[in-house]
Image (tube, rainbow, N blue to C red):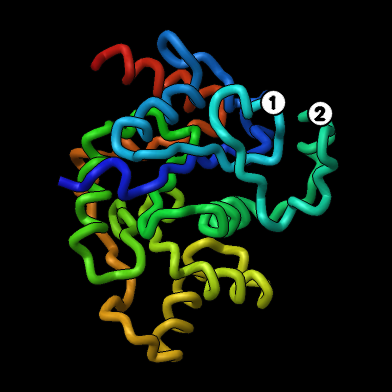
Amino acid sequence: MFANSAATGFVLAGGSGARMGQDKVLLPWGDSTLLEEALRKLRVVCGEVRICANRLDLGAYAPIIFDAIALDSVTPGAGSEEAGRSESIGPLGGIVAALKNTATEWNLFLPVDLPLLPVEFLTELLERARSSAAWAVIPCLAGRPQPLCAAYHRDLLPGLVQAVAEGKFKVMLALESAVQAIQDARLPDSREGIDRWDIPLQEQANWFLNLNTPEELEQAQRLFLRC
């Protein structure tokens, strides 16, 4: 069994919620909120849990890791509204910042808007990471990678930082570039490549339902009530 202390969990909560028409991070979900639901699940499988976001008000729920790219433009002590104006490169900035601040080899990322994903899946994801010879485990749904709900080895950090410097802001593009950089450097490690974990679409399609619009939120709530 993969010990809880062997991994750090990060909730990716940096989206603007523009398509939702409001801040979705603290939208109600069951008896709590989307953020609290994501934190609850990660706390089951990880020894330490943090939030990747460029806003200070979420610090009441868990320690905040600011976007590595936006950090310089966040004024210490500023309110969340000011922090929210920071320039960002999207989820990749949060992943880079997380890997800069982690103390564990393996790090699990979970978007705040994936509330239907069960804890059992996260447990299996970390178990797969522990036994994998890859640098990252990326679930794939019908062949489409889901790199925001994935496990990353912290030694990917230098390659991801280099990818950002080269303007590769798409997460999969940056990840592939980082792995290639490690392989080119021929470092003395047995790991190689990316573990693309195929998930049966017919069974788990709803698990990866992102809540980007009010309609998607309503759909997810109906599915949640059926469980």
| Residue 61 screen position, x and y as percent | 55, 24
Q: Quadrant of the C terminus?
A: top left
The secondary structure type at the circle numbered 2 is loop
Residue 51 vertical placement versus 101 (above, below): above
User: Visible in this render: residue 145?
Assistant: no
The secondary structure type at the circle numbered 1 is helix
Residue at image point 29% right, 63% down: 196
Residue at image point 64% right, 33% down: 17
Residue that numbered label 1 is attached to: 57
In terms of depth relative to the viewer, which is nearer, 129 or 85? 129
**Residue type for callout 2:** Gly
Residue at image point 20% right, 45% down: 124
| Residue 161 screen position, x and y as percent | 60, 70
**Mark 1 and mark 2 residues within 8 Å of each other at the beta carbon:** yes
| Residue 157 screen position, x and y as percent | 52, 67
Residue 76 vertical placement versus 133 (above, below): above
User: Visible in this render: residue 191?
Assistant: yes
Name the residue at the left extreme: 1
Residue 115 vertical placement versus 172 (above, below): above
Which one is earlier in the sequence, the residue at label 1 or at label 2? 1
**Residue type for callout 1:** Asp
Distance CA(mark 1)–CA(mark 2) = 7 Å
In terms of depth relative to the viewer, which is nearer, 107 or 101? 101
| Residue 182 screen position, x and y as percent | 43, 82
In terms of depth relative to the viewer, which is nearer, 9 or 102? 102
Q: Residue 198 has which mark?
A: none
Question: How many residues crowd mark 1 within 10 Å: few (<14), some (14–19), many (20+)?
Answer: some
Residue that numbered label 2 is attached to: 79
Question: How many residues crowd mark 2 within 10 Å: few (<14), some (14–19), many (20+)?
Answer: few
